[in-house]
């Protein structure tokens, strides 16, 4: 049976799609120009954000998505929000200025998500090889004044430029040598300046400092969430983060990564993982402990005939310390039953996921936990 796997994880993935769907990002290639490469974008990101998205090359992601089997399902989520507004101007400017090397002006891009999570409650950060305000002025010229004359406001000795849009919204921007910060919410740009001046940015978080903006494989797309891959392990603690590396190919969309927890918590979390009780019922399977996972997968694999649910189980790794396979249509009928097993950002949008089977595995290596989430489309 041919499987088509795709993740549609509510608002956070929707925000990812706002970025993926933006046209004209051919200029977001890496170019480590001298003026911008030493800017540490993490020093601008407020530490109270609920999520952070990071990429080195949206052009690659944008080109890959239409070639996937699940592209149409992704398109159904729509393309709205800040980056869609910006794309109108990037499209025209990138075409008009292609001969002048706009692709050499920008490299790393981040986006922070803030509560309550919505397309407008995001801040986008660019690291570039020029002063950020120069690019915004060029955008205004490219649109023949479409952005209008920006209003300049002072906040704690820094200048915020507010650009009016034709739909009645605004883009608030804070920029300097080697960086550009934009948001629909001026108050969020003010929070960025606060974080920079007061030292309350995510750069002070050791869990993220060792991960974000470090060397990774080319064309990466990574989401960091203030959550646990398995809320049952947290026992009310909210200082953990999770890393989700997002991977696309023709048939599969999956997220892999690790739980980012303080050293003092890791062993307790790992020990707790082994004690999770099993759940075996129609369309839901939860098994903890590597021997039990191995035995369960072996039993399902030996069956003479397989349902799609069985194939999701059989395709998992026998070396994992925990696995969960669930038909999300059933989860959506009683979401409160699964609050301890699924991250909140996923469970809150489970109605959008009824057409998928979710497979989750956690693997213990020493005192560290890695995870993988795979969403299989029931066609």
Image (cartoon, rainbow, N blue to C red):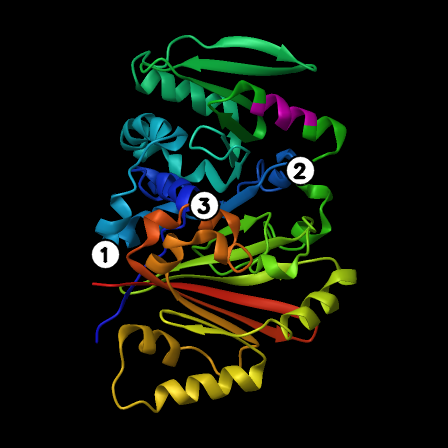
- Mark number, residue 47: 2
- Residue at image point 41% right, 40% down: 15
Residue 163 seen in the figure: yes
Vertical position of residue 344 compared to residue 157: above or below: below
- Residue at image point 48% right, 88% down: 295
The answer to which of 22 and 321 lies nearer the viewer is: 321
- Residue at image point 58% right, 41% down: 50
Label 3, on which residue? 348
Q: Quadrant of residue 356?
A: bottom left
Q: Say few, some or many: other residues with alpha carbon within 10 Å of mark 1 (under 14 / 14 to 19 / 20 or more).
A: few
Q: Is residue 114 magenta?
A: no
- Position of 263 with respect to 135 (left or right) is right
- Position of 13 with respect to 344 (left or right) is left
Question: The N terminus is located in which quarter?
Answer: bottom left
- Which mark sits nearer the N-terminus, 2 or 3? 2
Marks 2 and 3 sit apart, C-alpha to C-alpha, by 23 Å
Marks 3 and 1 sit apart, C-alpha to C-alpha, by 29 Å
Q: Which residues are magenta?
A: 188-194
Label 1, on which residue? 67
**Residue 214: x, y in percent?**
60, 54
Q: Nearer the viewer, mark 3 or mark 1?
A: 3
């Amino acid at each position: 049976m041919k499987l088509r796997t795709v993740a549609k994880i509510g608002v956070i993935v929707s925000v990812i799609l706002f970025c993926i769907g933006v046209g004209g990002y051919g200029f977001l290639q890496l170019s480590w120009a001298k003026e911008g490469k030493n800017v540490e974008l993490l020093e601008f990101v407020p530490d109270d954000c609920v999520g952070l998205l990071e990429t080195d090359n949206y052009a690659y992601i944008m080109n890959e998505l239409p070639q996937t089997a699940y592209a149409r399902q992704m398109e159904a989520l729509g393309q709205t929000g800040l980056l869609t507004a910006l794309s109108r101007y990037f499209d025209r400017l990138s075409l008009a200025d292609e001969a002048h090397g706009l692709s050499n002006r920008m490299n790393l891009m981040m986006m922070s998500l803030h509560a309550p999570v919505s397309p407008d409650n995001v801040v986008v950060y660019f690291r570039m090889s020029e002063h950020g305000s120069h690019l915004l002025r060029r955008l205004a010229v490219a649109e023949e004044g479409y952005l209008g004359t920006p209003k300049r406001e002072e906040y704690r000795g820094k200048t915020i430029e507010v650009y009016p849009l034709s739909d009645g919204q605004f883009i608030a921007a804070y920029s300097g040598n080697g960086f550009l910060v934009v948001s629909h919410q001026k108050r969020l740009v003010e929070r960025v300046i606060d974080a920079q001046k007061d030292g309350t940015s995510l750069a002070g978080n050791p869990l993220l400092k060792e991960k974000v903006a470090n060397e990774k494989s080319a064309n990466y797309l990574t989401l960091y969430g203030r959550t646990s891959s398995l809320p049952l392990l947290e026992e009310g603690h909210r200082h953990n983060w999770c890393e989700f590396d997002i991977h696309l190919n023709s048939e599969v969309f999956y997220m892999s990564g690790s739980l980012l927890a303080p050293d003092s918590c890791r062993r307790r979390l790992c020990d707790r993982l082994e004690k999770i009780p099993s759940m075996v019922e129609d369309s839901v399977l939860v098994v903890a402990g590597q021997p039990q996972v191995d035995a369960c997968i072996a039993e399902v694999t030996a069956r003479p005939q397989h349902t799609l649910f069985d194939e999701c189980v059989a395709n998992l790794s026998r070396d994992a310390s925990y696995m969960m396979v669930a038909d999300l249509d059933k989860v959506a009928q009683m979401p409160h039953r699964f609050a301890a097993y699924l991250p909140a950002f996923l469970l809150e949008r489970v109605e959008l996921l009824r057409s998928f089977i979710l497979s989750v595995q956690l693997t213990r290596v020493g005192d560290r936990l890695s995870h993988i989430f795979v969403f299989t489309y029931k066609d």
